[in-house]
Image (cartoon, coloured by chain):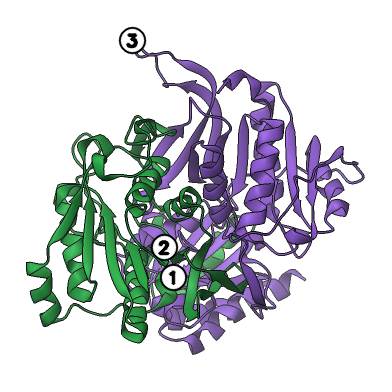
Amino acid sequence: MNLEEYKGVYVFAQQVDNCINSIAFELIGKGKDLAEALGTEVTAVLVGSGVKGLADELAEYGADKVIVVDDPELKEYRTEPYAHALASVIEKYKPEIFLVGATAIGRDLGPRVSARIHTGLTADCTQLEIGDFPLNPVPGKEQKHNQLLMTRPAFGGNTIATIACPDFRPQMATVRPGVMQKRERKAGVKANVEEFNPGFTPDHKYVEILEVVKAVSNTVDIMDAKILVSGGRGMGGPENFKMLEDLAEVLGGQVSCSRAVVDAGWKPKDLQVGQTGKTVRPNVYFAIGISGAIQHLAGMEESDIIIAINKDETAPIFDVADYGVVGDLNKIVPALTEKLRTELAKNN
Amino acid sequence: MKVVVCIKQVPDTKGGVKFNPDGTLDRAAMMTIMNPDDKAGLEAALRLKDQYGAEVTVLTMGLPKAEDVLREAIAMGADKGVLVTDRVLGGADTWATSQTLAGALRNMEYDLIITGRQAIDGDTAQVGPQISEHLNIPVISYAQKLTIEGDSVVVERQYDDRYHVLKAKMPCLITALAELNEPRYMTPGGIFDACKAEITVWGRADLKDVEDSNLGLKGSPTQIAKASDKVRKGAGEKVTLDPGESVDYIVGKLKEKHVI
């Protein structure tokens, strides 16, 4: 493998139902930082059926080039045709870095692609930068420059590790949604589009889609919320979430929850914050009746302001809370909602 | 029908993580468990055994003491255990791990391979899909429900806002979510069987069609630049007040920070 042949930062622009997922813009944003450090460009790879019209949106968020792989076989996500699309793009264009979102799609697609083209893949990265590997010179070992240094949590968020892939290309990473910053959208920018179709011939690896069942949810994605009111096992039961909904409504926020709440069947999975749920960074995160397992903290500790209410003063949530209140949530939350309602009415 | 379940012995991070003075993980001081997603995968296989008489083999890679997790699986009802252990396989990343397991699986008969979605120590979710790629078979990740229809599997595959009902011809590989089922307990009879069960132990020489350059630390494309404890933001204020004062305190802070 001649590593010098590999140039450019590529990102997988995930779309579902011909709507681009926010992670695509986050990857372009981070990709721009990396590309600037390397003196190269960011290319978004858009895969689907009838998706060419979405290319300009990727350009508006900063993609210098968009490769469109458009084929009827790519209408719904399936591992094999999508893996074939990305592996073919990599073989043809030889990128030095390839980023994929650590979504339920990307965490399936990334490993299949990296195994096909024989390169390393670092999962669920929360930080990416260009630097030297090894970080400091080691006698008898070549120190390589301009390497992608990929940082990720491990052991349930207890440790962080920085990983490099010095001898294989592209350097691949899946990146946790909600962590990287998008660039500001520049309306009207037109994409520099290149169409590419490697050919899709169904074989034994193409699974058959019998049915697509969409969850009925009319709430806004919790990852986009500025204020989250999050409940845990301490809420005591699904009926008590009404309290949180009232508080969220007064503040113009959304309700989210911990894993225990999803496991108990009180709330659906798409409201779950944490290692196996979503990573959120709202302006204000209320952790109510949430003890703060390390897996939960991993999904919310980057929030600007964390306010915790819990009757257990030793709960680990207080270790990350900016403002911790030890007390009975059943008394505090309704009173807080009322007080805020009055205060906000005064402002108007 | 033959089912192979890949399982991993992992440190129990729920009980807290212990570190050596040098900052590395003190594995010896931590309890080990069968990885939760893998256990759900094993339970799914055991239900196929109950329903269709499937033969269930559990496969793991690790240190010799990983034999314990195979015996636990046999005590739950698995028929056979295979341990792949060899010094030259140590330090493997997901690429080298999946190459090792694929090398072992080439020596085994299977209609269905089940792995957990991810292990709680690494959380990568990569090894299952990578094994399927090396074996050139279809993969369905994130399975929340699994049934058999003739020579195919029908699986509910979970996404963020939906699920797909997918059908794949066997042989294929499924990665299981812990939500798939409630794993059964070991039985007294099973524990008795597990004690006397012969565990098959394989080394490097027993792996089929795998190059040395794809195994162990040397065969791992990813390398660790550094590892450290996570630095947390640290606690802010903590107050214990009566409910009315608590409300005033929170409202005061929201005003101070210009949230309201």
Q: Nearer the viewer, residue B254 or B142?
A: B142
Q: Which of B245 and A184 is in front in this view?
A: A184
Q: On the rendered structure, is A338 left or right of A276?
A: right
Task: Characterize the local packing of mark 3: few (<14), some (14-19) or many (20 or more) Cα atoms within 10 angstroms.
Answer: few
Check if mark 3's residue and mark 2's residue have beta carbons within 8 Å: no
Can the viewer see residue A172 in this picture? Answer: yes
Q: Quadrant of residue B210?
A: top left
Q: On the rendered structure, is A322 left or right of A98?
A: left
> Which numbered disc, 1 or 3, marks the residue closer to the eye?
3
Q: In this view, does A2 lie above or below B191?
A: above
Looking at the rendered structure, whether the residues under marks 3 and 2 are on a common chain is answered as yes
> Which numbered disc, 1 or 2, marks the residue closer to the eye?
1
Chain letter of disc 2 in the image: A
Q: On the rendered structure, is A321 left or right of A20?
A: left
Question: Which residue is tagged 2?
Answer: A324
Q: Which residue is drawn at 85% across and 43% down?
A: A186
Report which colour depicts chain A: purple
Q: The green chain is which one?
A: B
Q: What residue type is labelled 1?
A: Arg
Chain letter of disc 3 in the image: A
Q: Which amino acid does label 2 sit on?
A: Gly
Question: Which residue is tagged 3?
Answer: A139
Q: Which amino acid does label 3 sit on?
A: Pro
